[in-house]
Image (cartoon, grey):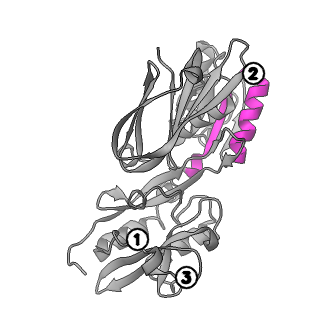
Amino acid sequence: MSAEYATFGLAPAMRAGGVLTNGDYRVHRDFVDFIVDGRPLLFQLSDLDAVSPLASDIPPAIFSAQVRSLLLEADAPLAGGRYVIYGCPECEDLACGAVTAVIERRGDDFVWRDFAWQTDERADLELNGYHGIGPFRFRGTEYRAALGSLLTSPGLTAAGGERRRVLLIGTRAAVIAKLAAALRIIGIGAETTQDAADIPADELRTYGAVAFGRAVTEQERAAVRQSFEHAGVEVAYVDGLAPIVPLLVAQIEHALDRSPRDQRRLTRLVTANGEAGIEVTSPCRVQLTAYRLDRLYRTHAYELFDGVLEAGEHRLTLDAKATKGESFIVARTSGSVLVEAMGG
């Protein structure tokens, strides 16, 4: 064990939900991530689609129990003094796989060691251990202060989840209804209206974003913004690119992302002249999807790229058929989504 200390912190994060081209849904999850030496620990675990046990949508009593468990105020839930660090975003079943580690106290310090991928009651370190990660030794005062704040600070506890609702404003009732249904399926509350003037201020404060359809006039948009300003609410405003539900869901997911920019994996997407420029901060799986409206306003979807990219900037050539006319590109990792209209 090295005497060198690692820093320990927490930050809001999300597992981005979405509507996939095959019709499947990915559930949206807000959670609190562990920041070790200034970077999310999740980023060190290859391309893992997972969330920490500190998720915003679990009951407060269970959330508090998870925090106290990490503070070693309760017995370890798994054999060998092991704790779940990251688990399946869709369920809580260990059979789906989880990243676990031994957490122990060394004097006043806390140590996380022997990280492993675990699918049953006992971890096989030789076969499934993360041999390049840890051990991490955290100063007790820093560690207890960070986790203890979750028991007293509801803002960080919810990781933005308390405002995981979207107000949808548009003139195309069928599209708005389908969008609201899709958002609710992936775990995002959605309400529709034509006029926010009569919505009570307390209700306006529950929204994290407002999405406008393309046909909403600037005067109507200004009136909505004024209603939120009078209520003292700061929300993200989404200008819908096209009446395509998966595309609009991706735009809203991006707007709801409350994670610090310097702690995101996917940080840049630019599109022009048949190419996409992408920047990622750590190796991860990136999926590129194009959505196109033809002359009859029918939607076409194309899977353009699905692979692991190393940290840095990348230029990808896009299928000309997928990007002709009015088209849009969605870049997705497990934790974030970016959307751009295809430039000429």
Q: Secondary structure at mark 2?
A: loop
* Residue 79: image location, x then y, percent: 53, 87
Residue at image coords 51%, 84%: 76
Q: Which residue is mark 3?
A: 77
Label 2, label 3: how far apart the Cα atoms are: 50 Å
In the rendered view, does 9 fall on the left or right side of 307?
A: left
Earlier along the polypeptide chain: callout 1 or callout 3? 3
* Residue 331: image location, x then y, percent: 51, 37
Cβ atoms at labels 1 and 2 below 8 Å apart: no
- Name the foreground residue: 293 vs 248: 293
Q: Amino acid at mark 1?
A: Tyr
Q: Which residue is mark 2?
A: 172
Q: Secondary structure at mark 1?
A: loop
Residue at image coords 55%, 66%: 87
Residue 11 colored in magenta in the image: no
Residue most extreme to the right: 174
- Name the foreground residue: 296 vs 226: 296
Look at the image and give the residue range highlighted in magenta: 161-186
Q: Secondary structure at mark 3?
A: loop
Q: Which residue is mark 1?
A: 130
**Which label lies toward us, 1 or 3?**
1
Q: Amino acid at mark 3?
A: Pro
Earlier along the polypeptide chain: callout 2 or callout 3? 3
